Structure formats: C-alpha cells, structure tokens
C-alpha cells in the first residue's frame, strides 16, 4: 500500500548500519560477516551453505544483498532450479 514511498536517511549509512543495526542484530544472535566475498550459495541437507574465501559455512537463513542481476550467478544450479522466478 505504501510501497511507492522513498525514504532518504538523514544520517550516514555507516552510522545507521554499523553503529546501530549490526550491534542490535548481534545481540539477538544473528551472525554477521562483513568484508567477505561470497562466491556461491547452495542447499545442503537442511541448511544453506555459503562459500566465501574458499571456505563453506552453514546457515539456517541467508540474505543475498546484491543487485538483482547478480543473484542467479551466486546460487547453485540446484538452488536456482527451485526459484524459477529468478530467470
């Protein structure tokens, strides 16, 4: 209903994200890894595996925060097949 609205932050994003949001999420048990280059996200049994810096990490949930044109290139073929709307 209000999806057309555009919010412009009054403070720098560094202050909003690094000084407020990240500590708030960390206090609630969210694991955040900044400055890591992710090369692939794939399904493994009951978890998602994220490959970054040639190492694989399991996660229950993953937020893929990249431009929409890059999402499919990060997902394994198996995971991409489960999300046909990406193509």
Image: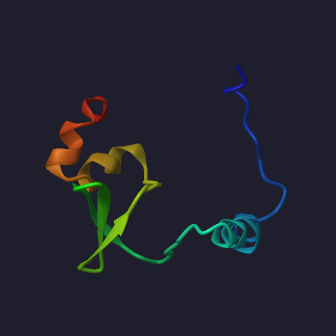
Which one is nearer the viewer's eye here, 24 or 20?
Answer: 24
Q: Quadrant of the C terminus?
A: top left
**Depicted 63 relative to depicted 21: above or below:** above
Picture coordinates of residue 1 (x, y %)?
A: 70, 19
Tag count: 0
Picture coordinates of residue 40 (x, y %)?
A: 26, 62
Q: Residue furthest right?
A: 10
Q: Residue furthest left?
A: 77
- In the rendered structure, the answer to whether residue 52 lies left or right of residue 21 reads left
Q: Residue furthest top?
A: 1
Quadrant of the image occupied by residue 50: bottom left
Quadrant of the image occupied by residue 47: bottom left
Picture coordinates of residue 86 (x, y %)?
A: 30, 35
Which one is nearer the viewer's eye here, 15 or 75?
Answer: 75
Residue occupying image coordinates x 25% and y 52%: 75
Picture coordinates of residue 38 (x, y %)?
A: 33, 68
Residue occupying image coordinates x 41% and y 58%: 60
- In the rendered structure, the answer to whether residue 11 lies left or right of residue 1 reads right
**Depicted 55 relative to depicted 14: above or below:** below
- In the rendered structure, the answer to whether residue 15 lies left or right of residue 64 reads right
- In the rendered structure, the answer to whether residue 11 lies left or right of residue 76 reads right
Quadrant of the image occupied by residue 28: bottom right
Which one is nearer the viewer's eye here, 76 or 15?
Answer: 76
Residue occupying image coordinates x 40% and y 44%: 68
Which one is nearer the viewer's eye here, 51 or 28?
Answer: 28
Q: How is the image coloured?
A: rainbow
């Amino acid at each position: 209903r209000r999806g057309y609205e555009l919010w412009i932050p009054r403070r720098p994003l560094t202050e909003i994200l690094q000084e407020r949001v990240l500590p708030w999420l960390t206090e609630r048990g969210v694991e955040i890894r900044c400055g890591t280059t992710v090369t692939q996200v794939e399904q493994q049994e009951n978890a998602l595996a994220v490959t970054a810096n040639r190492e694989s990490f399991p996660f229950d949930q993953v937020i893929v925060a990249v431009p929409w044109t890059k999402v499919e290139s990060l997902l394994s073929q198996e995971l991409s097949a489960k999300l046909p709307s990406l193509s």
